[in-house]
């Protein structure tokens, strides 16, 4: 577990360094490797965020699929908000609903809550154990089951494989 | 090279249109939660598109712009979540046509139980 955290945090820090300097000179890469090695040894091994992702082929395929689903939902949500704002009658029907998640890991839940915030008409407000409280701009008349189906399912099936 | 510049400028323009709509949403929406909804979504895609447009005009900045985009995607929903949670905690009034508030209901349930025992 510690080795996984160390490796992933090291790679993330190195990638950030390479993107920031955007040069492939040997000296600059060497400095980056040394600095990210030190930071990963000091802090990376304690950061749970880096350790909870699963490293299998299936998880990586799901991660790529999730990225595309996420971008598509983000574009859809922006068009949705734009149409609501521009509509003279302001068609909103807001409320706070409760949804249930099957995800166990903390990082998975964090990513799920962030994704919910960036999808059409939903904003995650609070989380208690396995229940997320979501502000929904256009509440449909339904219960916990049906709200979960509408809001959470499309991300959960990918995140379940990535984080478990 | 010239064509890339024009495409970048057009994408940046779209980004600023989304940012403008987000600002309009802040004015038009009736309560704090709906305002946060409009503000978060529009500002996220607006910023991403603007940065992408700059990336097409200045390809050598690509890496830095990519990092900026990642940070915007990670931090924007977190800040809006914290704002809305704080607003709910101190009991900011909701829009008069609000349909349900299950969080309020659950909090009242858990708060009232220990007092009865």
Image (spheres, coloured by chain):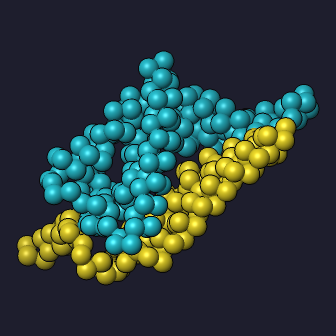
Instruction: Examine the image and state in which quarter residue A161 appears.
Output: top left
Instruction: Please state which of residues B62 and A112 is positioned toward the viewer in this rendering.
Output: B62
**Left or right of B96, for residue A125:** right
Tell me what residue is drawn at x 49 percent, y 47 percent. A75
**Left or right of B109, for residue A110:** right
Image height of A126 relative to B107, above or below = above
Instruction: Please state which of residues B90 and A63 is positioned toward the viewer in this rendering.
Output: A63
Image height of A55 relative to A8, above or below = above
Tell me what residue is drawn at x 67 percent, y 32 percent. A11
List x then y, in percent, for residue A108: 41, 41
Instruction: Please state which of residues B62 and B104 is positioned toward the viewer in this rendering.
Output: B62
Residue A41 seen in the current view: no
Instruction: Examine the image and state in which quarter residue A3 appears.
Output: top right
List x then y, in percent, for residue A141: 16, 57
Chain B's colour?
Answer: yellow
Quadrant placement of the C terminus of chain A: top left
Residue A159 seen in the current view: yes
Task: Note the chain letter of the cyan one.
Answer: A
List x then y, in percent, for residue A110: 43, 48
List x then y, in percent, for residue B83: 45, 69
Image height of A52 relative to A151, above or below = above
**Left or right of A54, for residue A5:** right
**Left or right of B25, for residue B44:** right
Instruction: Please state which of residues B114 and B50 is positioned toward the viewer in this rendering.
Output: B50
Q: Residue furthest left?
A: B117
Tell me what residue is drawn at x 60 percent, y 61 percent. B17
Instruction: Examine the image and state in which quarter residue A59 appears.
Output: top left
């Amino acid at each position: 577990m510690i080795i996984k955290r160390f490796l992933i945090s090291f790679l993330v820090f190195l990638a950030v360094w390479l993107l920031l300097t955007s040069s492939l000179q040997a000296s600059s890469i060497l400095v980056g490797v040394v600095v990210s090695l030190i930071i990963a040894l000091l802090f990376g091994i304690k950061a749970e965020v880096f350790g909870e992702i699963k490293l299998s082929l299936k998880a990586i395929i799901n991660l790529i699929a999730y990225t595309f689903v996420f971008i598509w939902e983000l574009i859809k949500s922006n068009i949705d908000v734009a149409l609501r704002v521009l509509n003279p009658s302001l068609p909103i029907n807001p409320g706070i609903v409760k949804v249930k998640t099957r995800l166990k890991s903390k990082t998975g839940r964090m990513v799920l809550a962030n994704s919910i915030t960036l999808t059409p008409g939903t904003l995650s407000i609070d989380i208690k154990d396995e229940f997320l409280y979501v502000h929904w701009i256009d509440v449909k008349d339904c219960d916990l089951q049906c709200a979960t189906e509408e809001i959470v399912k499309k991300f959960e099936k990918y995140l379940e494989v990535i984080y478990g | 090279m010239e064509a890339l510049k024009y495409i970048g400028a057009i994408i940046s323009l779209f980004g600023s249109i989304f940012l403008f709509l987000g600002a309009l949403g802040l004015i038009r929406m009736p309560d704090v939660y709906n305002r946060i909804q409009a503000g978060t979504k529009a500002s996220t895609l607006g910023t991403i598109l603007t940065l992408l447009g700059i990336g097409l005009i200045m390809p050598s900045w690509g890496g830095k712009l990519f990092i900026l985009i990642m940070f915007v995607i990670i931090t924007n929903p977190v800040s809006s979540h914290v704002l809305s949670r704080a607003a709910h905690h101190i009991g900011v009034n909701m829009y008069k046509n609000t349909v349900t508030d299950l969080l309020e209901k659950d909090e009242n349930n858990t708060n009232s139980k220990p007092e009865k025992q």
